[in-house]
Amino acid sequence: MVSRVIPVEDFDLVIFGGTGDLARRKILPGLYRRFLAGQMPDSSRIIGAARSEMDDAGFRDMVAEAIAEFGGDEGGDAACLKRFLDRVHYVPVDARGEDGWAELAKLMTRKGCEVRAFYFSVAPGLFGDLAERLRLHKIADRDSRIVVEKPFGHDLATARDLNATLAAHFAEDQIYRIDHYLGKETVQNLMAIRFGNVLFEPLWNAHYVDHIQITVAETVGVAGRGSYYDQSGAMRDMVQNHLMQLLCLIAMEPPSMFDADAVRDEKLKVIRALQPIASDQLVRGQYAAGDGQPSYRDDAENPDSRTESYIALKAHIANWRWAGVPFYLRTGKRLKARASEIAVVFKDLGHSIFPEDESRHRNILSIRLQPNEGIDLQVTIKEPGPGGMRLVDVPLDMTFADALGPEAEGVPDAYERLIMDVIRGNQTLFMRGDEVEAAWAWTDPIIEGWEARGDRPVAYEPGSSGPEDALMLLHRDRRRWRDIKTEVA
Ligand code: BG6
């Protein structure tokens, strides 16, 4: 298979917060990787903008360090790095004042560059200031694009405010709201698997599917970002956005075409059809201390914290396709493995013609997002050897790295892909304003519910699969969670 890298148009990308953590860890190394892959035209420029006083040379040193520290230089040499750094500039800018804007405006007068993108890698409180000044100084026009990151609001009211602030200066087709899960290769593969194969879609409904499990398990705790996380918790940090996006892609109706609004219209319908969650449909947990590691409360530096580092819930989508099918979602920190998967568990056979076999068999399609991206279809076959028709379940496992060879290795990471999509003007993998608001409209009452009841999260052992109560959530329904495993044997 030959790798196909299609260069994007010539562009200028301004990164506000260009000296910040996200820029150093993800955005800048990612851009360098795209440069090395030949996707970035030589004339394109990356302009860092932040409050620190620095010149081009100082910023270039910082970019080189970030690339060395956070990866991105595989396959490059000193000459490549120099060519890349020649495209990098820096302007000190005060988001809330007038300093630096005239210089930025001057720098942006390059002729012949059609695409201007502005990455707001800053606190949401600055979005309005930046948007306003970009328009005022005529740096952005009707064709410019802006990129914003999560958290996009803390609840419905704040998300609406943010949308209104951006809408005062930019049209919806100029706003790219990043959810980096949508940039993951396997997440997009969800759509390919569903809508590129004739096999699955006829079975993808309440007649054949017993239930669906979505798991995003992490081994990391919240140390280092406890003060943000403690205000947020797993519901706001992961469910409202990443897990919601996975749920949408797995549950949505086929869009009429693979186009930004067609896809986003279908996702929105799923979110709007989500039923409210009762208190017995959810379990919240907090990791305890163990294995020489501090507890959640210590990491968050809040001895009385009621914020959850784990959540499991049972959701229902009220539409014809999914009526009665539970969607079990769980995500947590400090769990036994970093493993994310979606498992579609099909119903039992209505009738078995094999009387010697009394065990229960099920087809399960599991889509592994990370690590070891791939799909695995559990099928039932005859147990080999004599002894009559006894049946056994075996995996038809496809790890994409094995199946696709080196082709699977060069895939851009989520940020690289999404930034290139911004330059291409393709919004399919970005959240639309109404989607974000609908997700908050579902999330808010759930959070308000546990706050009003004064619920406290239950403690769970670090390195475990989460709280015992979460097991009960499924046991009560005569089901069980799938094992959280790192590698598939
Ligand atoms: C971020 C969350 O959006 O996603 C983090 O704020 C979380 O808390 C991270 O750790 C997980 O992303 P990934 O790509 O490592 O699964």
Image (tube, rainbow, N blue to C red):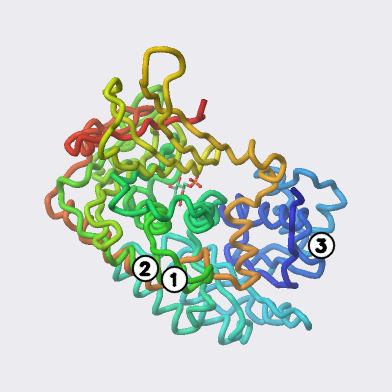
Real-space Cα distance between discs 1 and 2?
9 Å
SS for callout 1: loop
- CB atoms of marks 1 and 3 within 8 Å: no
* Earlier sequence position, callout 1 versus callout 2: 2
Type of residue at label 1?
Arg
Reading the image, the residue beneath label 2 is: 268
- Location of residue 341 by image quarter: top left
| In this view, 170 is above or below 454 | below
Q: Which mark is in front, 1 or 2?
A: 2
Labels 3 and 2 touching (C-beta < 8 A): no
Mark whose residue sits in front, 3 or 2: 2
Local packing at callout 3 (Cα closer than 10 Å; few below 14, some 14-19, many 20+) is some
Question: Label 1, on which residue?
Answer: 432
Residue that label 3 marks: 86
Q: CA distance from mark 1 to mark 3?
A: 35 Å
Relative to 237, is 398 above or below?
Answer: above
Question: Looking at the image, which is closer to me, 311 or 182?
Answer: 182
Q: Position of residue 208 (x, y in %)?
A: 32, 48
The amino acid type, in three-letter code, at marker 2 is Leu
Disc 3/disc 2 C-alpha distance (Å): 42 Å
- Residue at point 51%, 29% (across, down): 487
Nearer to us in this view, 402 or 280:
402
Q: Residue at x 53, y 71 (%)?
A: 259
Q: Nearer the viewer, mark 1 or mark 3?
A: 1
* Three-letter amino acid code at the position of disc 3: Asp
Percent across and percent down for residue 191 are 50, 57
Mark 1 vs 2: CB contact within 8 A: yes
Q: Position of residue 285 (x, y in %)?
A: 27, 39
